[in-house]
Amino acid sequence: MEDHLKDLNKEYSEIPIPEQLDLIVNRSLKLSLKERRKKQLKYKWFASVGVAAVVFLIAINTSVTVASALSSIPGVDRLVKVLTIKEYIVAEDNYDANIKVPAVTNMENKDLELGLNNKYLSENKALYEKVSI
């Protein structure tokens, strides 16, 4: 058995290694690194866009000044109007409620826009009344 292992080891050691093997391995490693960098860059880009969107949403809903300044920019005004949220606040001795209602504006289909806004408003008014009882 030991002789058989020695023979296999000798056979393995005598396998010729091509001269271009190092070149092929190095090329493969470089391609792999480039692909990883592209993926990392893509994820960083998506994360940056997501963070910017969250900051934009928070800014227009917490500051009237920011919302009015951004709504004066053509094209951005529609986005600001859609993302601005109406808010109901109840602060009593025993309970607090803060209900925010989205508003949809500037749609081509005015019936759909009105229907969505009425639906959102009625749902949140019912919630407000339930909390304030």
Image: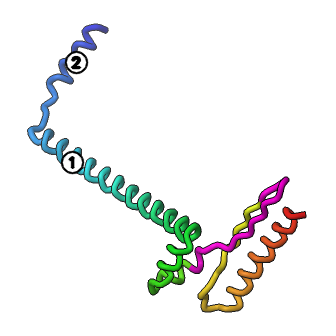
Q: Which residue is mark 1?
A: 30
- The answer for how far apart the CA atoms under marks 1 and 2 are is 32 Å
Name the quadrant containing residue 41.
Answer: bottom left
Determine which of the numbered discs, if any, sits on residue 83 in the image.
none
Magenta highlight range: 81-96
| Left or right: 73 in relation to 88 | left
Residue 88 lies within the magenta run = yes
Task: Name the one closer to the observer, 1 or 40.
Answer: 40
Q: Which residue is mark 2?
A: 9
| Left or right: 94 in relation to 111 | right
Q: Quadrant of the N terminus?
A: top left
- Give the residue at x 17% y 22%: 13
Task: Name the one closer to the observer, 10 or 107.
Answer: 107
In the image, residue 36 above or below residue 65: above
Dot placed on the residue nearer the N-terminal end, 1 or 2: 2
Q: Name the amino acid type tagged 2.
A: Asn
In the image, residue 5 above or below residue 13: above
- Front position among marks 1 and 2: 1
